Every structure is written in structure tokens, then in C-alpha cells.
Image: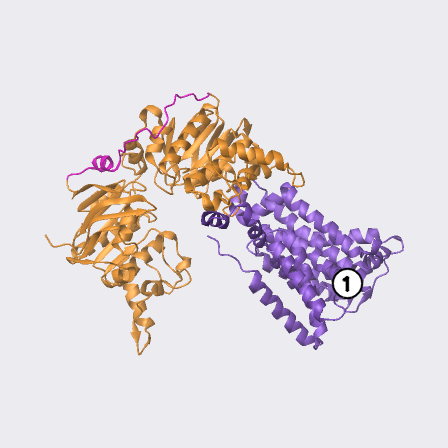
Amino acid sequence: MAPPILEAREVWKGFFGNPVLKGVSIALEPGRVHALLGENGAGKSTLINILSGALSPDAGSLQLDGRAVSLTPAAARRHGIAVVQQELSLTTHLSIAENIGLGAYPLRFGLVDYRALARSADELCRSVGLDEDVARPVGELSLGRRQLVEIAKALFRKPRVLILDEPTSSLSAHETRTLIGLVTALKRAGTAVLYISHRLAEVTEICDHVTVLKDGACTADRPLAGVDAAGLVRLMVGRDPGDLFPRWDACPAAQPAVSVRGFSAGRTMEVDLDIHPGEVLGVGGLVGQGQEDLLLGLYGAIPASAASAVFAGRPGLPGGVTRANARGVAYIPADRKREGVHLTHSIADNLLLPGLARGAGWRRRARGAEARLAATLAGRLSVKGDLDRPVQALSGGNQQKVALARWMPLDPGILLLNDPTRGVDIETKREIYAMLRGFAAEGRAILLASSDTPELVHLCDRVAVMRDGRIVAILERRDISEERIVALAMAADGVGRAA
Amino acid sequence: MTVRDRHRAMLPGRPAAGLAVLSRNRPFLTLLIVAAVWLVASATSRGFGSWGHLRYLVELAAVIGIVGAGQTLVMIGGGIDLSVGAILTVTAVGLPLLSSGADPSGIVAILGILGLASLIGAVNGAGVVYLRVHPMIMTLATATFLQGALILLAGGSAVTVHNPAVYLLGNARPLGVPAGVVLWAVVALATVAVLRWSRFGARVYALGANPLATALSGVNVPATSVALYAASGLAAGLAGILALGMNGQGYVGIGDPYVLTSIAAVVLGGTSILGGLGGYAGTVPGAVLLVTISGLITVVNASPGWRSILFGSLILVLLLVSGREVPRR
């Protein structure tokens, strides 16, 4: 067995006192395709960033060809480590060839040799299965084709270590086949490949070795031969919920508060959904499968259509945020800094805004009543201190509580929550979970999209799993388990469509 | 006082820190600068400190202040209105053309021209919201359009007004206070009331601080924006009528100085050019400060070209000294 080119030993990394990687080791050997698996938030991206020099570990070491190194992105590139990120890093107004060669243009008499650049770019494009004129601006290409350019760009520097982060997520079946062929060829040529994918069929097909991360720790580091998809899923899931979640009894009403058939909005396609008063309906799946568009569409924030829809007893989609609010629909966004709160404004102003958004603009504000209302809301949420402080002075968890509490005066019957506990400390999570079950017990209908699988398992009456913009299954409470959700999300259940 | 007490006194939020709070209050600081400039100018320049001259300065500042009321609203809402000068000119040139014998008091013509000014503002707002044109481009395009239309309509010559209401506004002095200053006071009270006491005002602040979060909070963003720019058009129209009354004549170009000065007054008064923070209380001393500086430059007795260069440079210096934005996270 050849010695590894790049190796991480006992690497630790935390953000703001929150450990993300807890002593992870991984060794990338030449001529081997190494799979890295894990749920959302297991620490995969952090590990990739450390291996490519974008982050430096808090503890532990990186070894390159057997020698300890500390990497920067530039040094990593120099040593032949190339990363293809999920977020594309292409310059849209430059041509395919220019993007591929960016930063390492071939020179001739001190000038860029565009002919040589075009020649090598063309060659690379054909090897990744991209049949485009290399003079075309990247901005004209589809997302899948851009992904191929990104891969060609990584290959341009003839890397010894190639890290592919979800390379097939936007590729067609045909393009995926070409890519798999390419990875196999690279492996034969002696490249060390790290392959991150949620598509387990692909992983079992091309990878030789697998490392599984769960909550920032390694749960498996072994040859892939002899492991089936169900075994991999088991290695990824299973967290001890502890006493984080409240106990509750199901109390859904028979008549749904929201009922849509053939609902489409943005990435969400042809969804049938009923949300009953008194229930928490979870929406699970991998990140970016249309969950956010489902919520925004129901909220009227993005254009949506439905074959039939009933909201709060009235037919038709609300078709606008203001009208959705009038029907008792409230939305709590995932990106609270950008979409949820007004950072420079005071806690009180933030708490009062949804109320002030309603009614005629010239109506006078009742400052005394407003102050009392803000104080009541803050008290109920245990947000302490001066309410005139700007919201940006609060912790992420308290900001989220503000984003949630400000809707309460409107007494919404339908709550749409988009990953409400992302980046929230454990204590606030507990409070938010208790609040959500409390809202359900009061007879509100709650739709909870979450990237945190335990949350779906322990908090929801039913869970809808989304994949590629569609709901692939709705699990009843007795059927909900992390294994089922993850298997459905990754199409490892045997019923999913082929990748 | 023990050492410990002294340390306590330095902490923010202590009663002893009242002066510190005032020193961070931008409207108050701008007012202090005005007072300082007036004191120094009265001591060094003969006649500057006379009652008549100071009254004249405030009367001149009224035009900037009224335009600045609309500009304050728009800028708190996260936009900017570069068409205020052109709208001011439209009212000053258009009103004399509207006057007729069937309207002896001139009130109908005034209401008509103010309606037109608001409508132009609403078109600005609609362009910004529905066509998604950047406010700077939209209002600049409107301004250019209006200037062309005025040259075609008025033919470039000055028009004299024969409207009794406009004349009164420009020249009457009830109880010794110029009518224009009275109008400014009314506009100022209305602006402060809208910003501080109305639901609309709360929405404007929210819109300027974070348009996306504001839309997701249920605020009708299109309606709010259109209303904002319409209010700015109305304010510029009011200022145009006042300028016409004070001048007696309207001409193409009468509104030109008010684009930069209205924005400068707003920023000097501490309103964030990024939107979401500020208020009208600062714009008032900001307007007076600008007029004072302009007056002092006239005293220097330079040629018109140099006066303009000096004024522009001084505005820049003032903004550098006082209008620095603290970078936001």
C-alpha cells in the first residue's frame, strides 16, 4: 500500500466554542477514491476546508508526503491539492478557457498565450465530457455545465490530490457517467481522490474506502468493500436526544388548516400537503431540495401555483406576504440576519414590526401600549435587559427568539419555520422546542423545515421528506426514525429514482 | 470621590454620562456647529449677527429644509432622490403657467401643481419598485426628462408669477416671522410626526435597514416606497412654491442647487446614507449650516466660479468631519 499523500491526524476545530471536528483523522492515498460521508452539519465541509488550507486546525496536524505542514490555500495549490467546491467559484463573464487557466495562464514572450490556453482547455473539457466552444463565457452555461468547467479547472493544474464536494449534485445522468469514468481514470493515474456525495449508489460504485463523520467524530474509516447502503446510513445517524425535546401527546384536528394539491413554487414541484391544527409537520431532506421554496411559496413571498389550495378555511393561495399575514400565516426564516431581524434596530422595534406592518400607514402609534407589548413579549421569551439595545448585540439564539416572538401578537394560526435552530445554542434550542410544542397544543398548525434530523424525529407528528423538489414520502409518527429519513433523503431506500 | 466611583462614572449608561449621551447625538452636534459658526461670524463680520440677517438666513434655509424633509424620508427608507431639483423647477416654472382668472386666490393652481409634483415622485417610486431601477438612476433619469420638458414648455425664459397666495408665502411676515419659515415649521412637525408617531414611519425605518426582512415581516414594500418618493416630490413642490414666492420669478435651473444641498443637509444631520437610521431633527440644523456657509462665502467677495468651488469643497470637508459612516457588520 502506497503511503498517503495528504493526511490529517487527530484534527480538532471549533467555532465560537462550538466543536465541529473532534479528533478526526483521514489519509488520502494515491490511486484510491476515498468517500467522505456524513449528515448535514457532521463536519464534512470543515474537514475539506482544513485539507485545502482554507482553515487551520485548532489541534492536530496535517501531513503532506509524510512531513508535517501548515497549509494556506496558495500553498495547498502549489502542492497539487485541488478542490471542487459545491459553491462554484467561476467568473461568469470570462470564457471557459480563461476560467480554466485562471491564475496560471501559459505565457509566450511574457504575454498570455491564448492559443496554448485554448488548446489545453479544450483537451480538458473533452476529458470531463463538456463539448462546448472554450471561448464561450461561463455565464451562458447551465449550472451542470459550469460544474464541469469547475472540475476541468481543478484538473488544469494536474493535481495529486483532488477533492470533489458533491460534484454530481447538478449533473444529468449522462454527465454523471462521464464524470465517474474520469474519476476512475484519475485513480488509475495515481491521483488521490476525496469524494463527497449524498448519492450512496455512486459512492458504492466508485469509491474504495470510506470515512464516515457523525457530529464531528469519525464513526468509520474502512474499505468500502462489503458495506451496503443501509450499513452506511446506520453509521451516519443515531444521536442521543437526551432531554432536549419535550414530551407531548398528539392532538391534531381533523380539518386541515392548510391543504394544497399540485403545489409548485421555485424548486418545489407538484407537492400535495395537508397541515392540521395542533400538529408539527416536519420537512426533511438534504439541504436545498426545495424545502425553503415550499415555505416561501406557501407564505406568498415567491410566485407559486397550485391545482387547489385552502388556507385557514378560505380557498386559494394567499399570493402575497401581507395577505398571508392577514390569513394568520407567519414565517420564520433560516437566515435570520438577512431575512429575519433588523440588526441595527432595537429589540423593541423588531418585536413590534409585524404589528406595525398591518393597518393604514397614517394610523398613530400607541407608544405606551407598544412598550408594554414589547416588555410582555421579551418577558415571555426570557430576553433580558434593555429593549432599546440593537438586536445585533444579542446572541444568535436570542435573535432567533426575537424573530419568533414578534409574530405572537398577531396570533398566527399557521407557522412556517425554516430551520429555526440553525446556529442556536443548546439551551435556546430546548426553549424553542418547548415553544413549538406549546404552539401546537394551542391548536396552531406548524410546518417545520429542518436540516437537523433528530429535531424531525423527536418533535414532529409527521415528517415529509423532500428530494429534488418533490415530497418522496410522508412518514407517520410511528414510522419516523433517523434511518428512514436519511435513507429517503439519499434515495437509499430502493424506491428513489436513479441518479 | 473614590477611585472606584470615578471608574463607575466612566461606564456608559450612568446618570453622570448625560453629557456623553448628548455628545453622541448627531442633531445636537450639528446644532452646536451652527451656533459656533454664528458666534464666530458675528464677532468677525459686521452685520452678520443682526436680527434681520439671521432671519434672512433661516428664511433661505427653509427651502433646503423643506426639500430635505422629503429627502430625509427617502434616505431613511434606503433610497435617494436626485430629482428634487428638477421637481422644484417644475413647480416654480409650471405654476405661473397654470394661473388663470377663474382662480383669484391662486389656491387651485397651487394644489394642482403640488399634485403634479407628488405624481412625479410616485413615478420615481414605481420605477424603483416595479422596474427595479436603482434609485439614483431612476431619479436622475426623471430629472433629465423633466429638464427637457421644461425647456420645451417654458422656452428657457423666466416667468413672472401673479398668484396672490404665492406672493403672500414669499413675502408676508406674520408677527415678524417670514411665512416661509412658518411653512417650514409645519413641514418639520409633520415630518417628525410621520417618522416617530405613524405606522408608516416605522415601516420606512424597517425598509431602510433591511428591505428583505421588512418584506417578509408583512410590510407592503411597493406601497411604502411609492408613498416615500411621492412625499419627496410633494416636499420639493412645496419648496418650489416658496422659492417662486421669494423670487417673484421662476426659471429653468432654479432648483439645481437643491439636489446636493438637500442630501448634504440630511447627512450632516446624522441620517445614515445607508438607510434605516436617522431623523428629521438633524436635517433642520443641517440646512441652516449650509445656508450660513453659503452666506459667509458671499462675504468673502470672490467671483461666482470660485464661490461655487469653495462651497462644494466646504460641503465635502463638513461631510468628512461629521458624516462618516461607522461600518456595519
Q: Position of residue A349 (x, y in %)?
A: 55, 41
Horizontal relation, residue B44 to residue A474: left or right? right
Q: What residue would you read off at disc 1?
A: B56
Residue B124 lies, with reference to residue A384, above or below; the image says below
Residue A464 lies, with reference to residue A251, above or below; the image says below
Q: Residue at x 71, y 54 (%)?
A: B235
Is A101 part of what is drawn in magenta?
Answer: no
Q: Is residue A54 visible?
A: yes
The residue lying toward the viewer, choosing from B228 and A231, is B228
Query: Quarter holding the C terminus of chain A?
Result: top left
Which chain is mark 1 on?
B
Specify how the rendered protein is coloured: by chain
Q: What hue represents chain A?
A: orange
Q: Position of residue A164 (x, y in %)?
A: 27, 52
State whether the magenta stretch is mostly helix, strand or loop.
loop
What kind of residue is marked 1? Tyr
Q: What hue represents chain B?
A: purple
Q: Position of residue A380 (x, y in %)?
A: 48, 31
Q: Residue at x 64, y 50 (%)?
A: B228
Work out which residue is located at the far bottom of the displayed protein and give it: A109
Horizontal relation, residue B211 to residue A20: left or right? right
Horizontal relation, residue A207 to residue A147: left or right? left
In the image, the segment drawn in magenta is: A226-253
Q: Position of residue A488 (x, y in %)?
A: 31, 35
Horizontal relation, residue A368 to residue A34: left or right? right
Q: Quadrant of residue A199?
A: top left
